[in-house]
Image (tube, helix red, strand yellow):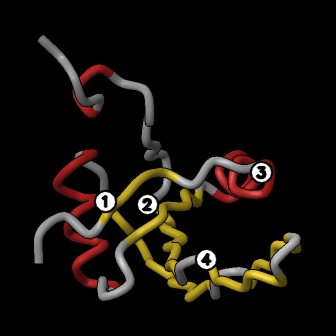
Amino acid sequence: MKNPLLRPWLTEKSTGLTEKKGQYVFKVKLDADKTDIKKAIEEKFGVVVKSVRTVNCLGKSKRQFTRKGVLQGKKSDWKKAIVTLAKDQSIDYYSGSTQKGEG
């Protein structure tokens, strides 16, 4: 599989996990498994991954009320990975080596 990582998932809760427990949260592809995620993070950021936990998140149902009736739809399902790093290791999301659009 190509790179299963889509982007870091930055919320208040994920930032708290990073500060307290050294865990980082990423949005990943639905078909990604834990070993692929571990390899991708170790290669991309040069860190040692201790463990990976994954969560399948269901997309929200949406309704829009219009003059012609009710339009119903659903957002896409997605998956997130909670990655625990080895002690004294960290990931810098904003370092120049991992940003796109250089040069």
- Amino acid residing under circle 3: Gly
For label 2, count other residues whose C-alpha is less than 10 Å away and answer few (under 14), some (14-19) or many (20+): some
The answer to whether 72 is drawn above or below residue 86 in the figure is below
Alpha carbon distance from label 4 to label 1:
34 Å
- Quick one: label 1 or label 3, which is nearer the N terminus? 3
Residue at 54%, 57% (x, y): give it: 24
The answer to whether 60 is drawn above or below residue 103 in the figure is below
| Marker disc for residue 31 | none
Front-lying residue, 33 or 77: 77
- Quick one: label 1 or label 2, which is nearer the N terminus? 1
Mark 4 or 1: in front is: 4
| Marker disc for residue 16 | 3
| Residue picked out by circle 2 | 86
Mark 2 or 4: in front is: 4
Element at label 1: loop
- Quick one: label 2 or label 4, which is nearer the N terminus? 4
- Tell me if label 1 and label 2 are in contact, CB under 8 Å: yes
Alpha carbon distance from label 3 to label 4:
27 Å
Mark 3 or 4: in front is: 4
Residue at 30%, 88% (x, y): give it: 31
| Marker disc for residue 48 | 1
Alpha carbon distance from label 1 to label 2:
6 Å
Front-lying residue, 71 or 22: 71
| Marker disc for residue 75 | 4
Element at label 2: loop
